[in-house]
Image (cartoon, rainbow, N blue to C red):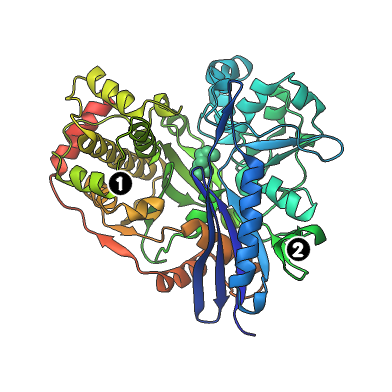
């Protein structure tokens, strides 16, 4: 049989895209069919996702994907997005309000409230999940007693919600479910004791499905809207974007690797066969999220390019018309490691006033304050590289797995300065690419389910190495300077 085409829907916090992957013996190609912005909206004091706008982008993208695919045939569709957030449906299947954005303030004080229900040690031992105020568990606790949650008969995580609208079939994909803090990473099943203790009704979640499982077929009304002939199956993929991105790491089976999935967040860690549930791991705020093929994504969340995106947004609002290329050139020339902030600090989670918040953090820690946007960008990139260094080192120490190379994938691949600084900070070679790792991981899981490729994750990854040009960064510069900067953050 000739190559098959697959549509990968990949929704990120700042943009969504639909990519077409063409896969066959000796072929793996990925093309962008459609890209659209994801702009959250604040209304009446709450920060929401514009989920219908996103769904329209998905439909436009699937129409474009059908046109881009040879003979207009899509062998299947897979959907991934950011984690933790959800839509609620009433008994008739209608959406009960817009999904709330994980950066909304409603989960303020979540750690304290949760600790009153279950000691954090016990919660970690049961779920292996890092504490983040936005974990679905905390969102559900914050929403307890609201009319929407009381009327809800079903809860669908964002990619599952999109899949439901496309197919009419509800399901809960496991890699994303593992970010709810309601799953036991040892069994890959619900952590029922946790749900009971927090009063979460697990029957709201449709049955679990795993990457590669069938997830229905596009409805007739959808086929008509996007101008395709059926049947077009939907296949469950690593529906958490980070799970698909880690599946899309072009690792070479022989070399132990750490990965950093960069985008709005940097997710930095290692891939394991089993979770690390030690108290030391909890204190280091490492998470055990589930990956494709029963793997564990042992990683830490770092604020990521969000810091830069929010600086750009603030400068734009001030009428500065910032140009990213120019700013990055200025940042490259700015003095290295003049000041650093803790890019893991939850204080950077909420939107707004980012240049000021970065400056405040420098002042608070007795460091020089950046004098212009170029220096602010340098401070942000140095700080991200430093956080990458700490996460890669901690992941190795806590898991007992040493690595020889760091793979940087995701949008941050385009930022060469960040990739080089990451190599310098980690003292390890960095292999950068692909930027669209999540879409690659999404496509490969579909392609395997359809029989277009075979093998385990290592075999899928070997196809990736040939598919994309990768950039190599060797560590350079002053190792001691990174150690001193780390001491500033850890003080
Ligand atoms: C990255 C990501 C992270 C998750 C955060 C919030 O896009 O999915 O893995 O912690 O978004 O959902």
Element under label 2? helix
Q: Position of residue 164 (x, y in %)?
A: 75, 49
Mark nearer the N terminus (2 vs 1): 2
Give the numbered dot on residue 223: 2
Which residue is the site of mark 1?
324
Q: Tell me the quadrant of the picture where the N terminus can be found.
A: bottom right
Quarter of the rendering containing residue 361: top left
Please say if the residues under marks 2 and 1 sit with CB atoms less than 8 Å apart: no
- Considering every residue shown, the one lying at the far front of the view is 319
Residue 346 or 178: which is nearer the viewer? 346
In this picture, residue 445 sits left or right of residue 196? left
Question: Residue at image x 66%, y 22%?
Answer: 141
In this picture, residue 96 sits left or right of residue 180? right
Q: Tell me the quadrant of the picture where the C terminus can be found.
A: top left
Q: Position of residue 276 (x, y in %)?
A: 49, 40
Residue 435 or 213: which is nearer the viewer? 435
Residue 115 versus residue 426 in the image, above or below: above
Quarter of the rendering containing residue 394: top left
| Alpha carbon separation for disc pair 2 and 1 | 39 Å
Residue 416 or 209: which is nearer the viewer? 416
Question: Residue at image x 24%, y 35%?
Answer: 373
Q: Position of residue 287 (x, y in %)?
A: 49, 38
Q: Position of residue 352 (x, y in %)?
A: 41, 27
Quarter of the rendering containing residue 375: top left
Tally of numbered tags: 2
Element under label 1? helix
């Amino acid at each position: 049989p000739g190559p098959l085409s697959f549509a990968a829907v990949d929704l990120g916090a700042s943009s969504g895209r639909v990519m077409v992957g063409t896969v066959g013996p000796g072929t793996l190609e990925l093309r962008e069919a459609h890209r659209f912005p994801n702009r959250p909206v604040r209304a009446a004091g709450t920060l929401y996702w514009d989920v219908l706008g996103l769904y329209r982008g998905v439909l436009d993208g699937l129409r474009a994907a059908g046109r881009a695919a040879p003979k207009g045939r899509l062998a299947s569709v897979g959907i991934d997005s950011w984690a933790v957030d959800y839509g609620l449906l009433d008994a008739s299947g209608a959406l009960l309000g817009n999904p709330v954005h994980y950066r909304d303030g409603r989960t303020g004080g979540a750690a304290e409230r949760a600790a009153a229900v279950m000691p954090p040690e016990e919660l970690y031992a049961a779920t292996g999940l890092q504490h983040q105020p936005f974990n679905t568990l905390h969102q559900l606790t914050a929403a307890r007693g609201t009319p929407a949650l009381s009327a809800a008969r079903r809860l669908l995580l964002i990619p599952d919600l999109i899949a439901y609208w496309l197919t009419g079939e509800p399901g809960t994909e496991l890699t994303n479910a593992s970010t709810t803090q309601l799953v036991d990473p040892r069994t890959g099943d619900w952590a029922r004791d946790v749900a009971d203790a927090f009063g979460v009704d697990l029957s709201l979640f449709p049955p679990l499905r795993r990457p590669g499982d069938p997830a229905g077929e596009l409805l007739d009304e959808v086929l008509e809207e996007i101008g395709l002939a059926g049947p077009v199956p939907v296949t469950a993929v690593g529906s958490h974007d980070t799970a698909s991105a880690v599946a899309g790491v072009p690792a070479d089976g022989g070399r132990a690797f750490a990965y950093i999935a960069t985008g709005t967040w940097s997710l930095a860690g290692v891939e394991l066969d089993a979770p690390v549930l030690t108290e030391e791991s909890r204190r280091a705020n490492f998470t055990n999220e589930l990956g494709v093929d029963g793997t564990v994504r042992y990683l830490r969340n770092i604020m990521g390019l969000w810091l830069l995106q929010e600086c750009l947004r603030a400068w734009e609002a001030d009428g500065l018309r910032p140009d990213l290329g120019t700013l990055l050139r200025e940042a490259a020339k700015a003095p290295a490691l003049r000041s650093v902030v803790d890019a893991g600090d939850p204080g950077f989670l909420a939107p707004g006033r980012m240049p000021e918040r970065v400056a405040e953090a420098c002042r608070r820690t007795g460091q020089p304050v950046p004098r212009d946007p170029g220096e602010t960008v340098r401070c942000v990139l140095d700080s991200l590289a430093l956080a990458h260094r700490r996460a890669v080192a901690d992941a190795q120490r806590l898991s007992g797995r040493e690595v020889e190379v760091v793979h940087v994938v995701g949008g941050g691949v385009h930022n060469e300065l960040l990739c080089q600084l990451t190599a310098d900070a980690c003292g390890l070679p960095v292999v950068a690419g692909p930027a669209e790792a999540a879409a690659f991981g999404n496509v490969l899981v579909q392609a395997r389910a359809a029989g277009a490729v075979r093998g385990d994750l290592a075999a899928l990854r070997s196809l990736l190495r040939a598919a994309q040009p990768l950039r190599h960064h060797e560590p350079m510069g002053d190792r001691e300077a990174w150690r001193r900067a780390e001491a500033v953050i850890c003080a």
